[in-house]
Amino acid sequence: LMWCDQDTCEDSIRERVVGEGNNMEFDGPATGQVCYAWDGDSKTTTKPQTVLLLVKRGDSSLLKVAADVVTELTQTDGLAILLAPDLCAKLKHYYGVDHDEKIHLFEPTPAPGFGGNHVELDDEFMGIKSDVTALNPNPDLVCTLGGDGLLMHASMMFQGNCPPILCVAGGSLGFLTRFSRDEMAEAIRISLGLQKNLEPEKEMNPTEIRPSYTEQFENSISKFSLGIGNRICISMRMRLDVRVINREGVVRARFNVLNEVVIDRGASPYLANLECFVDDIHMTTVQADGIIFATPTGSTAYSMAAGGSVVHPAVPGILITPVCPHVLSFRSMVFPDSVVLRCYVPTDARADASVAFDGRYRRTLHRGDSIHIQMSNYPVPTVNRVDHSADWLHSLKENFNFNARARQKPN
């Protein structure tokens, strides 16, 4: 058995032939829970020492939290902390956190091959860097103190290889932020192997049926513990490699997106007119306000608001969700992560279209331009509070009141 595309074939990873009857079986599931653990007894194990801290702008209460954590981690644990120049200046001015040998400035370095000819020269991710002396190694861990948007920010910052990200709640919704501010320093230590994780107490079954979220349920959750025993669970969040190609076949822009890429009509009063293909097989002609290509992580964002399915973050798939299609039969679809999707604006379209990448870097798609979408080789690893299923189901219930209703009383 082999896995094949139009060009090459490789030995099958999951399927196998067994027995004299040439029976075909699966060797296991397609995905699973990814974990890591630190070997504290190994003399050759080098523990990570560098943490990049990102803080949501415009919230003074988060600055105080960041100042306390930076002071604790540098003075007590000896960690090197990377900070953006503006954040470093604010922490020093307001809270006296000095720029010493353990605190370094960080400015993101554009990943080769990513960006676009429409990106501003002074863009914080893709533009030309300032003269500020900054240390730009790959941090061992990224800690975001904010909302889900800050995770998108971190994903855009690391367009190539992305370090593990620990998301601390400091925003409004927080679907992807499973750690509280009080747990921030301890979670960083455990994630880096600097502190042993306590064996978790008996956890409430995350799938247990309950009428709604209650204070009693909150109080029944065990004290802070990270992962399962000495294993730290992470979600390998798939990204989409998206390229804008003009009619001459030249790549004009390329981005890795964590949530979705959206093609819409932009400022035009006309419906978007797009031709969409899956592995060069014509799928459909889109006549709608737009179309969303989302990852499983993005399935609970714009795609869900447009009527798309909610997909577990470990499912290896790409979602296609139309935005206000002018037909009765166009519904959301899910394709395997092995496909290559292509949408182009036909030369006879009434107007140009527009495309945005995780809500940023919007640009016009002229007639003849196309978008190529496929699975990126660079996922975003995020640290789980418990595991990927428990965290995901907890967020669905807490943030969206998933399937919540009063239970009927027994007869």
Image (spheres, rainbow, N blue to C red):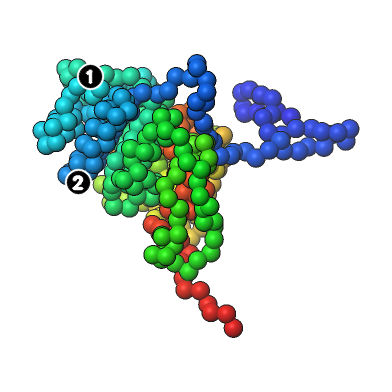
The disc placed on residue 101 is 1
User: Could you tell me the amino acid type at mark 2?
Assistant: Ser
Quadrant of the image occupied by residue 166? top left
Quadrant of the image occupied by residue 240? top left
From the viewer's perspective, tell me whether residue 195 is left or right of residue 106. Answer: right
Figure quadrant of the N terminus: top right
Q: Of all residues shown, which one is farthest toward the bottom?
A: 411
Q: Where does residue 362 sit, x and y in percent of width and height? A: 29, 38
Residue drawn at x 78%, y 37% as measured from the top left: 24
Label 1 secondary element:
loop
* Residue 100 visible (yes or no): yes
Alpha carbon of mark 2 to alpha carbon of mark 1: how far? 26 Å
The disc placed on residue 61 is 2
Q: Residues within 10 Å of mark 2 (few under 14, many from 20)?
A: few
Q: Residues within 10 Å of mark 1 (few under 14, many from 20)?
A: few
Q: Where does residue 403 sit, x and y in percent of width and height? A: 48, 64
* Residue 320 visible (yes or no): no
